[in-house]
Amino acid sequence: MAITAPGIGSGLDVNSIVSQLLAVERLPLTALDKKEAVFQAKISAYGNIKGALSSFQTAVLGLSDISRFQTLKATPADTTVYTATAGGSAVPGNYAVKVTQLAQTHSLRSGGFADLTSAVGSGTLTFQYGTLGSNPFALNPDKTAQTVTISPSQNTLSGIRDAVNAANIGVTAIIVNDGSAGTPNKLVFTSKDTGVNNSLKVTVTDDDTTHTDTSGLSQLAYDPNAVVGSGKNLVQTVAAQNALLDVNGIIGISKSNNTITDVIQGVTLNLLKEAPTTTVNLAVVKDTASVKSNVEAFVKAYNDISKTLKDLTSYNAATKQAALLQGDPSALSIQRQVRSILTNALQFSGGSLTVLSQIGVSVQTDGSLKLDSAKLQTAIDNNFNDIAGLFAALGKPTDALVSYAGATDKTKPGSYAVSVSALATQGFKAGAATAALADGAPGSGTFTTPFVIDATNNTLALKVDGVQSGTVTLAQGTYTTAALLLAEIKSRINGDGALKNAGVSVAVNFDSPTDTLKIVSGRYGLASTVEFTAVGTGTASTLGFSVGAGTAGQDVAGTINGAAATGSGQFLTGAAGNAVEGLRLQIIGGAVGVSRGTVNYSQGYAYQLDKLADNLLATSGPITSRTEGINKSITGIGKQRDAINQRLVGVEQRLRAQFAAMDSLVAKLKSTSDFLTRQLASTSTR
């Protein structure tokens, strides 16, 4: 144990002396502490840079979306009649709109019942959607029949209501008490979707085995072409109808919905009120306020990151204080990279704007950006469609039937030639001509003899795009026109659960000159296929379909930048290792075997800054690398500190041992001195 008491022999304050000597020995520790504090502060500073870069990236990522700079605004003169929104494909202008009729849903009611628990019946209710006024009922090809099972425990008026609503089939059921004596409660079915082609037909399979009478569940049957009381047992309370509107003098445009997206290009109309005698003007204009706010957001985001970097790397001449990262090579490199992007003009933009100064954004002497609002407004007025290219990654094909579909980080800016050697096609299964499909007058679409679907030809199964359907059952009956038959086949196939869940669908076509049907996949390319796996015994002789595969689709083929591109459906993707790697184009149609023009691909400033932020913030990026290096230095300081502390333990022990030995020697010398003093004193007294 170290000696801690004051020197006994010497009288020296050993503790104080040792402490002062050790303080000198500890001076390197103080230097290490200061050095570590600087390193810790630098890590904190890089944390600030990382946070600022993350915020900056969030801002520029949104601004690299082309749609942010191509917004249009649609404003009706009277928003009580309709409201409107405009998408990127809308055409600025004024449109005269008159709403003469709103679309409405179809409603059917039952007869009266005494109360909610009155027994009705059990079995199944099958709801079909289509258009009234034709025989047979003209099915909506885009809607599938929906069946609701009514168990004996659900056979009351309220039980049936709840079962239909729980099935979520596009029909709502409510009970209305009209106050009439004795039997005031009526069950009302209403289609959820508006339009004449969403009228309802209700077919009943009654557990009492009589399916069209007015007792049991068949009280709820409704066949618009049947006899009242014998299949036509519900009463229509509201007829389905389409919306009717006039646009720019085109009268009587009919749409099934009050939300209309396909009358004025790029504009969605939400009809609210009928105003048959009033024309309500619609103004579609460039949303300049949105573009201005996006440019202002870009300037602010850039200035924020620029200020953070400047504050951490600059020298204050007034205070003679250097910032934490002044001279730090990594921090200075980040600052240079951010600034350098804005100093280069964009190439291959395909537009008239190539530098930010053209829209009023200029770089100041301190590295910040300044926005000239007047110059920006001039650019909006004269070059609105080109502003997006200054910020977003953008491809501009010169061919109207070639569209830009995207690119990757590996795609290089440039102007690239496009050629197409083959267009994409859809897979199909063509049927054989049959007498049953004979067209009375070629091109009329009316069968010579009404086509009959019966138990011999009403079932089939098929694979579409490799997805196997269940058994598809067609409604038995007679079909006078090809349109009615096609709608039934399409509706039933597309309503199959397996196909629907897989997102695949078909179109059904009729070729009048050859009296043949064709089932066409909704997909393009080699993966587009149609194959019949099962048919009824009479299907081949009537519908013309037999078991077997059809003709597979073909992928588009061609080159981009002279290199063979990968075709998938209608999409061509640039070859790996080429400047166009990852460039994706959709070939909608057009000529083959000839040049299809060029596509100019450019990367706007927001896009470039977003990708720079990606690299800077990556785990292998300079910020991570630099902070890891600083942390290693801090670890090294810790090791040095441990070594010094370990050495100081030995130094203290040695000093205390030396002082103890000195003190002991002094004590002995003092004892000898005292002895000699006594002896001399004794001698002098003799």
Image (spheres, rainbow, N blue to C red):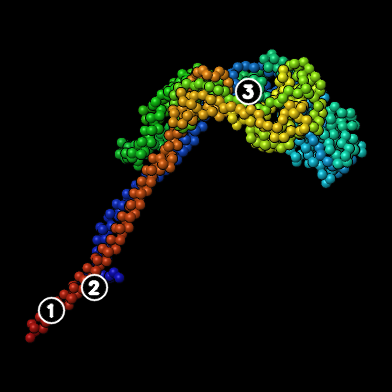
The quadrant of the rendering that contains the C terminus is bottom left
Q: Amino acid at mark 3?
A: Val
Circle number at residue 8: 2
Which residue appears at 92% of the width and 38% of the height?
Answer: 182
> Measured from the top left, where is residue 563 in percent x and y?
46, 25
Does the rendering let one see residue 582?
A: yes
Q: Which residue is mark 1?
A: 677
The quadrant of the rendering that contains the N terminus is bottom left
Q: Amino acid at mark 1?
A: Thr
Q: Quadrant of residue 137?
A: top right
Which residue appears at 72% of the width and 19% of the height?
Answer: 514
Task: Please tell me whether mark 2 sits on a helix, a strand or a loop.
Answer: loop
Q: Quadrant of residue 665?
A: bottom left
Circle number at residue 267: 3
Which residue appears at 73% of the width and 36% of the height?
Answer: 471
Task: Please tell me whether mark 3 sits on a helix, a strand or a loop.
Answer: strand
Q: How many marks?
A: 3
Task: Please tell me whether mark 1 sits on a helix, a strand or a loop.
Answer: helix
Is 498 left or right of 387, judged from the image as shown? Answer: right
Query: Vertically, is 37 above or below 368?
Result: below
Q: Quadrant of residue 44?
A: top left
Which label lies toward us, 3 or 1?
3
Q: CA distance from mark 3 to mark 1?
A: 121 Å
Q: Amino acid at mark 2?
A: Ile
Which label lies toward us, 1 or 2?
2
Q: CA distance from mark 1 to mark 2?
A: 20 Å
